[in-house]
Image (spheres, rainbow, N blue to C red):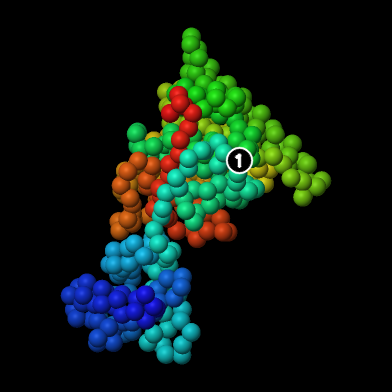
Amino acid sequence: MTHSELTLYLLQSLNMALGSQMQGETSYTNSFDVKVENEGFYFIPRLPAGYIVDDKLYQKIFLIANASLYPRYTLLKQTSAYFVPLNTDDIHVQRALFFPWKIGISKRLIISDLEKFSTSQMGTNIPIMENLTIDYDKVTSIAIAGNSGSGKSYALTYFLTMLKPISDLILIDPKFDTPSRWAKFNDVKVIHPEMNRSKSDFVSEINEALSKSLNLINQRQAILYENPKHQFTHLTIVIDEVLAISEGINKAIKESFFSLLAQIALTGRTTKLHIFLVSQRLDYNSIPVSVREQLNVLIQIGNINSRTVQFLFPDLNPEGIVIPIGKGTGLIQVIDNDHPNQVLPLLCPTYYTTKGIL
């Protein structure tokens, strides 16, 4: 469709859906207009108007347009009304509501040989979906949250395999489950519970590993002080089901765990130390708020509603976002200079792995 054809289509959709709600205010009465550009479309209200231009109107237009444009375009959900100024001297139409989009819909990667695929990638790029790749040099910390059976372990195994060629790994597996089996096949050291050992002792071992990582950060910062351009090897601390670590342990040990985690999250970015967290939920009982605020790759899979997204996406109302059905689907947000900060529908890659890991 041309821009003019798409404009007429959007106007018709909005006139039919909004006309009855805004007391007959339509484009036919010159109450608003639509302008289509490559990066999205503008809803241009003509003011004064008999309707309120606010967040409620913005979200209504989003719901109407997102359904109308699917699957040719995916509107990028905003947490609040996105106002932009227009280059005109006419005060009546000097502002617009902007609705950014991406062409098409999210599509899943299908990978026949994961090991070969991981070693074939250039640099530090990690493909997530078709047309969505993250550069690990620009990642601070990653989090995956989701209900039991949603595909968290499957997604984590993909990331572990992709990270192995580009990052050293410290793997912590409190359930002694999928990550431990992956580590065994890939000769990666893993910290896990052992027989005849208390949970406090297990978490103390984790704290010791985190303390060594914090010391490494300090050493690397001293090197950067002398040579700001020095390049370090990535080191990723991967913690599966972090909620299982922080619940039911001695208060002092838990506070030490939280403190070390927070210090690494806050100071590790420039020295290429990353934290990768996986949990059913990532509330204040699982991780400190300061750690959650440092996450710049956020993944929520499984059931998506206002309750499940409240910790990773506290300002997001997921209503209207079209999320495909199936395992390993949900939402993703990548916060860096290369991607818009909007939340996108996610389909985790499908791949085959060594028998016995999953």
Give residue 153's position: percent from left, percent from top.
Answer: 43, 33
Q: Position of residue 350 (x, y in %)?
A: 43, 41
In the rendered image, the residue lying farthest to the top is: 196
Q: Quadrant of residue 164?
A: top right
> Amino acid under label 1?
Thr
Classed neighbour count for the residue bearing mark 1: other residues with Cα under 10 Å, few (<14), some (14–19), many (≥20): some
Please identify the quarter of the rendering in which residue 315 is found: bottom left
- Residue at screen point 31% across, 80% down: 8
Q: In the image, is 80 to the left or to the right of 188?
A: left
- Quarter of the C terminus within the rendering: top left
Towards the viewer: 122 or 293: 122
Q: Is residue 210 left or right of residue 290?
A: right
Residue at the limit of the structure toward the front, as seen here: 112
- Relative vertical location of residue 287 with respect to residue 179 in this rendering, above or below: below
Residue position marked by numbered label 1 in the rendering: 119
- Is 217 situated above or below 89? above
Residue 287 or residue 251, whichever sits in front: 287
Q: Describe residue 277's horizontal placement relative to residue 187 as left or right.
A: left
Residue 119 picture location, percent across and down: 61, 40
Q: Tell me: 106 left or right of 295.
A: left
Residue positioned 46% across, 73% down in the render: 38
